[in-house]
Image (cartoon, grey):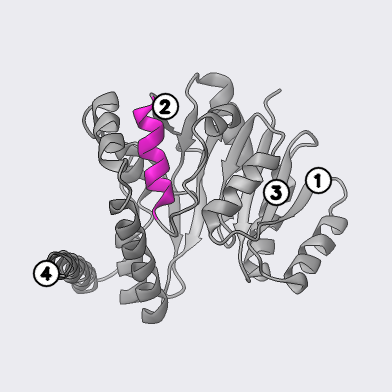
Amino acid sequence: MITISVVMPTYRDSVAALETAELLCPQLRTSDELLIVDNGSGPKHREVFEAFARQHPGVAIRILVCEARGSYAARNMGAAHARGDILAFTDAGCLPCAGWVDAIRSHFAEHQGSRVAGPIEMVFKHSPPALIELVDARAHLNQDRYVAQGWAATANTAMVREAFVALGGFDQRLQSGGDFEFGMRARAHGHSIDWCAAMVVRHESRYTLHELLKKRRRIRLGQRQIAGLAEFPEVRRRAMEANGEVREIGAPRAYPPMSAARWLLARLATRLLHTYERFCRVYERHAKTRT
């Protein structure tokens, strides 16, 4: 039987991590395991995780501590300690739907590929969704688009452990965008990625401007870091050659009912956000050439 190791990094948010762990525990068989990788949050958070593990003696839960900065370092540590055939990645605060683990298991039992990803459904705090929530949902975690390009957000993806190890894991130098970089590297080495519609994770949409802008700053940092990797242009070229053109994956993200005006405003706000960021990148390149 195929065994699953779920790897979940967490940093100073034990409440969100336990919410995810509570949904995972009923899905794990005795041969599976959950690795909660604390990214240096401190003893209080680790004590909470250890208490949770004691409350679930029938589930193999291991608490690891990663002192190296960054979620990709934490994921790599989890993968290094994993015993399962398959590494399943999700994040603290994500909500894996019932049957998520078995959907991953069934997929690898029926398919020969080494990578798979599934839908990420957004959960909205407000009804109808607030403008910030809609911008967040339109701009982020559109997993069907990512998989069509050959990569997947770590909120909902899985991979054969041996293949992950052979590829060297995530690039720990990156603070953001490591899932994209890894996906291109895997694709360049011939590891295509499959789509599994039954493998669903729900994710709460950001609803404050502060959180949205914080996310965008982190993305821009990752983009700059990837641009600074001397080897990445060649990796991306090989990835594009390996898998050909972008393909269509499933249906686009569904949104709750709302007025046409609200939807158009969200589209405009998202477009303005991306336009502003493109201007910032051009300005940064120009400033760099002048110095």
Asked whether the beta carbons under mark 1 and mark 3 sit within 8 Å of each other, the answer is no
Q: Mark 3: which amino acid? A: Leu
Q: Mark 2: which amino acid? A: His
On the rendered image, what quadrant is the C terminus found in?
A: bottom left
Q: CA distance from mark 3 to mark 4?
A: 47 Å
Residue 35's tag is 3
Residue 148 spot, x, y in % from top left = 30, 37
* 39 vs 109, nearest the viewer: 39
Residue 142 spot, x, y in % from top left = 35, 51
Residue 290's tag is 4
Q: Secondary structure at mark 2?
A: loop
Q: CA distance from mark 4 to mark 2?
A: 41 Å
Residue 9 spot, x, y in % from top left = 61, 56
Q: CA distance from mark 3 to mark 2?
A: 25 Å
Dot placed on the residue nearer the N-terminal end, 4 or 2: 2
| Range covered by the magenta-colored residues | 177-189
Q: Would you name the residue on which mark 2 appears?
A: 191
Asked whether the beta carbons under mark 3 and mark 4 sit within 8 Å of each other, the answer is no
